[in-house]
Image (cartoon, rainbow, N blue to C red):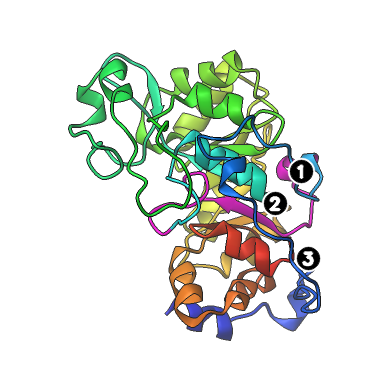
Amino acid sequence: MLLLLLACTGPAADTALPVDTAPPDDTAVPAAPPDPSSFDCSAAAIPERVTPIPWACATDVACTERLVAGHRGMGGEQGVIAPENTLSAIRAAIAYGVDFVETDPRPTADGVIINLHDTSLARTTDGAGDADLLTYDEIRAFHILSDRHTGDFACEYVPTLQEVLLTARGRVHVLVDANKTDRVDLLVAAIQETDTLAEAIFDTSSPEKIAEALALEPALHTMIRVESEEELDSELAGFAAHPPVIVEIPDTEPELATAVRAAGNRAFIDVFFTDAAVVYQEDPSLYGAFYEQGLAIVQSDRPELVLGWLGR
């Protein structure tokens, strides 16, 4: 359904968007993908930043580059490069040249903010139980499941948000998803303590959490999520004194990208259904429909495929 919508509902001719929507050069020869040893447990160091995109672009609403966000690091449940929400996933995103990594911070029973998507540890580790009922030491003892990934991930565990931010510092921007906890104070403290205000983008569907975060740290970059043009107008007006650097729109409403750009911002969308279609059809050009509709940033479970289509 989404693919059909994207194919049939491009921007009207009189609302042309100032975005480079030309497809990549098909004659370009893509670089070989990074070896897993450059980012897995055998890596000697955090990879150097390799993306050709200027660092400032990630937080500059005027930037017209086509950008890529890695869901849960280097891909969520569909990802094949590194286990989700691990430090290896952050290192992999850096090695591949991803522009943003998305995180899932949530608190443990003893108030440590860890990076874990699910409430339970059962799907991604050899442990069990809910994170908010276990201490950090108990969770740290579990091992990450990584049988379907190529490389050595035996050292991986559920990391803290601070560890994620320190790994990313100076190399990749981090979307700090605040939807899984009300402890805004702990999220902001982690950003401040790791000196990653330049890297972190506070991301949530809750305007109240954004306001709370900005009260604690006025220099924080933020990302709002809206469901309609009315909600977009309301939130941008509410944060006029501190505009967000990114606006996320629903994957069912890609046409909202036009309104976001008209308001002077950049639109961000999840492409997880398209990830599955790209793999099934062996056709990465399907990602192009999003950029052609004015989306500036796509978040993917297969960021390596999006980057490959972009010629990066």
User: Which segment did they paint magenta?
Assistant: 56-78
Q: Residue at x 25, y 25 (%)?
A: 132
CA distance for labels 2 and 3: 12 Å
Residue carrying label 2: 265
Disc 1 residue type (three-letter): Asp
CA distance for labels 3 and 1: 14 Å
The secondary element bearing badge 1 is classed as loop
Which numbered disc, 3 or 1, marks the residue that appears first in the sequence?
3
Which numbered disc, 2 or 1, marks the residue that appears first in the sequence?
1
Question: Residue 19: which disc?
Answer: 3
Q: Is residue 75 magenta?
A: yes
Q: Is residue 62 magenta?
A: yes
Disc 2 residue type (three-letter): Asn
Query: Residue 262's x, y, as percent?
Result: 71, 60
The secondary element bearing badge 2 is classed as loop
Query: Residue 12's x, y, as percent?
Result: 69, 81
Does any portion of residue 98 appear in the rendered image? no
Residue carrying label 1: 60
Figure quadrant of the C terminus = bottom right
Near-viewer residue (128 or 201): 128
